[in-house]
Amino acid sequence: MSKKIFNEKDRMKLSTNKYVVKISEKAITYADEFKQLFIDQYMEGKTPWEIFESNGFDVNIIGKQRVKACAKRWKKAYGEDGITGLA
């Protein structure tokens, strides 16, 4: 887990994104719809950073390590269990 702490301003900004289910100081819960969209766009050749940014996320707030970790986790889940692994 990332050591980055989200301040109130960052949490407010991130919470306006339709793909954020929940956010705390330490974690973001992403909508299953975004995880599926991520996999689809990744398979089309987009980078994780492009996918996050094109779907309204500020990678500078989230942090590149967190984006990288999400990508790794979701690709693994998809590889093991298909689309149901992302839920």
Image (tube, rainbow, N blue to C red):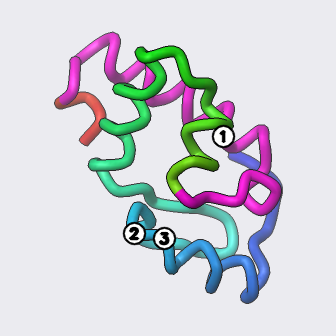
At label 3, the amino acid type is Asn
Q: Mark 3 highlights which residue?
A: 17
Rendered view: 35 above or below 46: below
Q: Residue at x 68, y 31 (%)?
A: 68
Task: Identify the magenta region.
Answer: 56-83
Q: Nearer the viewer, residue 58 or 81?
A: 58
Q: Secondary structure at mark 2?
A: loop
Residue 53 circle label: none
Residue 18 circle label: 2
70 horizontally vs 65: left or right:
left
Which tag is nearer the camera, tag 2 or tag 1? Answer: 2
Q: Return the disc, 2 or 1, that comes first in the chain's sequence.
A: 2
Q: Mark 1 highlights which residue?
A: 67
Is residue 64 on the magenta stretch? yes
Density class for disc 2 (Cα within 10 Å; few <14, some 14-19, many ≥20) is: few
C-beta proximity under 8 Å, tags 2 and 3: yes
Residue 8 in percent (x, y) is at 73, 88
